[in-house]
Amino acid sequence: MTLSPEDTMQFLLMLRNKGVADHVLQAMEKVPRDMFVEGHFKAHAMDDMALPIDAGQTISQPSIVAKMTEALDVGPRDKVLEIGTGSGYQAAILSQLARRVYSLERHRQLSIKARKRIEALKLRNVVITTADGSYGMPDQAPFDRIILTAAAEDPPANLLEQLRMGGIMVLPVGQSDAVQSLIKVEKTPDGLNYTELAEVRFVPLVAGVAKTDGV
Ligand code: SAH
């Protein structure tokens, strides 16, 4: 099953009706979500819901991906760090807006598949690495933008350190089994500014690289 242009149009209209900005819609138009899910979930790729991927993880709900992308306020010169590659969908969207995207995933099985999808889409400014994202990527820091797609109790200190002055971090915070808050953190000379964006539910940020992949 592949998506028809009508399916894509419906999808974009649905997002526009939810208030998603035009530049984000344009980025999302270029990334077919059905490529990022498998089997019978492809039939639901255009629905505004999170869907299962390998390793017990999920691809996020499209309207939340849109909201996070918009809040991150990415420009064409920005170097972005994503924690939690998952399917690679969010990274593929960010790649349309940023200069370069580094994405970290603790499940090797997921990073391998995500890398293949990114290659198939010929997105050459995305680098996916299997690693525990809570340490960030000190050798590539500082980053203009950092996005976490797994929930932490607080913004991880290592990542705040790797955010440049004036930079923006978007992440879900809170306990993994409760409703979490999606927040935006701006790093200013006067300290960190926090803005709450929405109530969300993400998988938790888990320490260490996964060992039980079978890959
Ligand atoms: N952004 C993804 C959705 C991610 S789901 C997409 O567009 O499909 C959250 C992902 O974060 C999961 O794949 C999970 O394995 C990963 N994750 C959790 N803790 C992590 C950590 N410490 N480092 C890197 N990845 C982590």
Image (cartoon, rainbow, N blue to C red):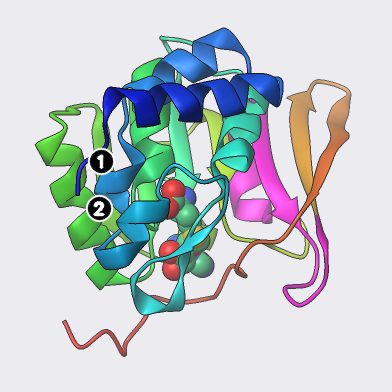
Label 2 is placed on what type of residue?
Ala
Taking the image as shown, residue 118 lies to the left or right of residue 131, namely left
Taking the image as shown, residue 12 lies to the left or right of residue 68, namely left
102 above or below 55? above
Q: Is residue 169 magenta?
A: yes
Disc 1 crowd rating (10 Å Cα; few below 14, some 14-19, many 20+) is some
| Mark number displayed over residue 81 | none
62 above or below 114? above
Disc 2 crowd rating (10 Å Cα; few below 14, some 14-19, many 20+) is many
Give the magenta-colored segment's residue range. 155-180
Taking the image as shown, residue 12 lies to the left or right of residue 159, namely left
**What residue is rendered at 51% in x and 46% in y?**
47
Q: The C terminus appears in which quarter of the rendering?
A: bottom left
Count of numbered badges drawn on the protein: 2
96 above or below 68? above
Residue 127 spot, x, y in % from top left = 25, 41
Q: Looking at this view, is 11 or 79 the one in front?
A: 11
Sooner in the amino-acid sequence: mark 1 or mark 2: 2
Q: Is residue 41 magenta?
A: no
Q: Nearer the viewer, mark 1 or mark 2?
A: 2
**What residue is rendered at 25% in x and 52% in y?**
114
Residue 38 spot, x, y in % from top left = 26, 62
Check disc 2 and report its element: helix, strand or loop: helix
Residue hosting label 1: 127
Using the numbered discs, state the Cα–Cα distance from disc 1 to disc 2 in whole angstroms.
10 Å
154 above or below 121? below
Using the rendered view, name the quadrant where residue 109 is placed.
bottom left
Is the CB atom of the residue marked by disc 2 within 8 angstroms of ligand 1's nearest atom? Answer: yes
Residue hosting label 2: 114
Check disc 1 and report its element: helix, strand or loop: strand
